[in-house]
Amino acid sequence: MRWIIGVLFLFVYGFIPFEDPAYPLDFFQAPVNQPLRLSGTFGELRPNHFHSGIDIKGAIGVSILAAGEGFIARIRVAPDGYGNHLYIEHPNGYTSVYAHLQEFSPEIEAYVREMQFRQETFEIELFPGKDQFPVRRGQVVGKMGSTGHSFGPHLHFEIRKTTTDRPVNPLLFGLKVQDQIPPRLHEIKMYEFDPQGRLLKSSILPLIFKNGTYRVQADSIKVAAKWVGIAVKAYDHMDGVSNWNGIYQLDLFRDGALCYGFKMESFGFDETRYINAHLDYQEQRSRGSYFHRCFTLPGNQLSIYQSPQNGLISLTPGKASTLQATVKDVAGNESNLEIRLFTEGQGPVIQAPRTPYQFFLPFDKPHVIDNYGLYLNFPANIFYEDLFMQYAQRKDFSPGILSLTHVLHNESFPVHKEYVLGIRPDPIPMQLRPKAFIAHRLKGGIVNYGGQWQDDGMLVTTVNTLGEFAVMLDTVPPRIEVDRFSTDMRRYASMSFRIRDNISASGNLPNLKYRASIDGQWVLMSYDEKNRRITHAFSREMASGSHALVLEVSDAMGNVSVFKRNFFR
Ligand SMILES: [Zn+2]
């Protein structure tokens, strides 16, 4: 039976160019000179993205080694994201990436410093020539750190196909990791659908481990619907570390036939946001719980799936069905799940209860909604399934709110890409217009999505979420707080400040900007966004005596704070 499906699979998918699975096994070495201990695996489920590399545990300052010969093709310093990171291009068609570095090797560090001064910026991206920084396999290129969006020392290591920039699972290149522990399965979620594919009900069932297999407590699960799907919460574990890492592979069989499967071998950065279709988005948002959905939503175009079926199961009334799942890690350790499903009687023709809605938006069509006060332009395939959108307006008299609040369904319905959102506020004075922005109003606070004024008085931007939106005003400059600074700095090697804004900016707006000068000369200040800290290390050449510091910080709306002080050094 399995053989027949294999042939069918080849027939259906044979013409799709899969990446060559034969990865070179001897080219790369480990990027650290110690046994690999991982706190993160490739394809691991993260907010809005799949993890694109492996996270290698270690201490600040551990030497980071070139995984293979090649040359340094790209260097970036950023206050967020990957922090200090670099890319090595190899002659075998792959590029390796090393992120969150404490510092680069001295010759790279000197080059970065020179370019930072030349461009008068901390944040910088450089593309050295092919001959500028050639590296040997095992050559030290930097030190392990925790810069950027990192909350503990580790190396984020990636291997990408150079021509496509697609990351590939680094553990497929022969790197050795001690792992004899199979993945653990924790819970399943059962979904029951009506004949139109609309959700009737869902429930979470804990799993027990019995006779070598994960099962639910009861012998079989009785369901009311004919159509069902499941989601699995599973994690991998490795020798010598306590981390819960991502699994490599999951296959689901219905009565012995493969009906769903994925492998975390490679994906494109342009498809990583499909994670919100792959997992149960609502569970992730409401409980921080990551379930692999074992049936694909119609708008999910991820390339990791390996079954021609979509994982939805049609039950025959009065007949039991067996669902089996195998979950694997890269080392080949495997765990199994087995559930018996049973639907009663005739298989009901229940309809899902219909919540009132204002707009029906089929996922594969574009939609424009324009009601004078609000303009929405959704491109096709922005949703993973049809949306029965609920819409309401609210008048809110809180200060700083300049328009109706438009309630677009809710944040728990995932949105794959940007759509155009325009809101027409009440008339506001022309001089305040540059300080107005489209605000996403969340329980935890406000996010600034910016906006451009149209001639007809509408403020327009792009967003990638549903929820509550209104036009708001921001005239409050960012705050500058002293972290380490006094008028007498003679005993200090560095000075630092904390900078923060009253409103957080969405991903498509600039970070807080800052510029510092001493005695009128630009000085380098590093920026650690997660700690909101900017730091200047004093140069040894600085003359002793009195110096004038000017520090300027501006937010996305152009509100500026200035800190001016003299100090001794
Ligand atoms: Zn990572």
Image: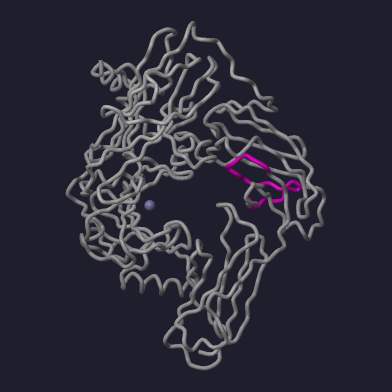
- Given the current orientation, which residue lies at the most extreme bottom position? 545
Residue 68 lies left or right of residue 511; in this view the side is: left
Number of labels in the image equals 0
> Who is closer to the viewer here, 464 or 440?
440
Q: Position of residue 515 (x, y in %)?
A: 56, 73
184 above or below 434?
Answer: above
The answer to if 93 sits in the magenta stretch is no
Q: Judge whether 53 appears above or below 524 on screen.
A: above
Question: Which quadrant of the figure has residue 88?
Answer: bottom left
Residue 164 appears in the rendering: no
Task: Pinpoint residue 561: horizontal percent, then vertical percent.
Answer: 65, 71
Which residue occupies the extreme left position in the image? 26
When the figure is inspected, residue 342 is found, relative to residue 98, above or below; the finding is: above
Percent x, y of residue 52: 37, 47
Image height check: is 151 above or below 380? Answer: below
Q: Nearer the viewer, residue 46 or 286?
A: 286
The reply, left or right, for residue 31 in relation to residue 43 is: left
Instruction: Please report the residue visible at 63 percent of the width from the left and 37 percent of the height from the top.
Output: 410
Residue at x 60% of width, y 30% of height:
366
**Residue at 51% in and 86% down:** 489
Task: Using the rendered view, name the quadrant where residue 166 is placed.
Answer: top left
- What residue sits 54% from the left and 28% below the top? 385
Query: What are the residue bounds of the magenta stretch?
Result: 448-468
Could you tell whether 374 is left or right of 220 in the image?
Answer: right
Q: Is residue 91 visible?
A: yes
Q: Is residue 450 magenta?
A: yes
Q: Quadrant of the N terminus?
A: top left
Front residue (pair 291, 524): 291
The picture places residue 136, in percent across and down from the top left corner, at 21, 62
